[in-house]
Image (cartoon, grey):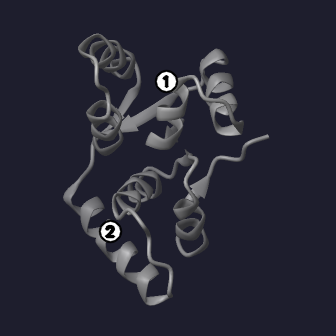
């Protein structure tokens, strides 16, 4: 099972190219189990302008495994952000610490296209999905 970050989904749905999009396309074509969580679902859907695209994307996400998030995950996210900041690595979007915490809690690799996750992985148990 692989958790796919918002950055990858946005590029995928916009038809952008890149190693991260190609990796996602391969995961989909190989019927790999892809999962999401509430934060990623909200980020992806809130950026969609047209109603038809919103409903199409929402239906697509309903086929994915959904990871519930506990209160402890939110607390872990705040601890992660604070510990990174103390080490001099300020994460640009604190929501990325939330996504990383979900991946850590479920011990899943994260497929992403966001440099902040590299910092997070260097200072935590976050596993990054390797793009070939």
Residue at mark 2: 76
- The quarter holding residue 114 reads bottom right
How far is disc 1 from disc 2 in space, using C-alphas?
A: 30 Å
Q: Callout 1: 10 Å neighbours few (<14), some, many (20+)? A: few
Q: Quadrant of the N terminus?
A: top right
Residue 5, visible in the rendered structure = no
- Name which residue lies at 64% across and 47% down: 129
* Placement of 80 over or under 93, stated as above or below: below
Residue at (44, 70) in percent of width and height: 91
Residue 98: horizontal and vertical position, in percent?
A: 35, 58
In the rendered structure, which disc, 1 or 2, sits on the residue that comes first in sequence? 1
Task: Depth check: give the residue in front, 76 or 40.
Answer: 40
Q: At which x and y percent is residue 51?
A: 24, 15
Left or right: where 128 falls relative to 79: right
User: Circle 1 sits on which residue?
Assistant: 13
Q: Position of residue 126 (x, y in %)?
A: 54, 61
């Amino acid at each position: 099972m692989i958790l796919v970050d918002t950055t990858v989904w946005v590029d995928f749905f916009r038809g952008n190219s890149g190693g991260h999009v190609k990796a996602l396309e391969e995961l989909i074509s190989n019927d790999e189990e892809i999962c999401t969580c509430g934060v990623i679902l909200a980020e992806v859907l809130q950026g969609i302008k047209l109603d038809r695209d919103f409903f199409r994307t929402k239906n697509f996400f309903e086929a994915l495994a959904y990871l519930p998030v506990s209160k402890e995950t939110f607390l872990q996210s705040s601890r992660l952000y604070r510990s990174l900041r103390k080490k001099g690595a300020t994460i640009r979007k604190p929501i990325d610490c939330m996504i990383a915490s979900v991946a850590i809690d479920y011990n899943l690799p994260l497929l992403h296209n966001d440099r902040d996750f590299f910092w997070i992985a260097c200072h935590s148990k976050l596993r990054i999905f390797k793009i070939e």
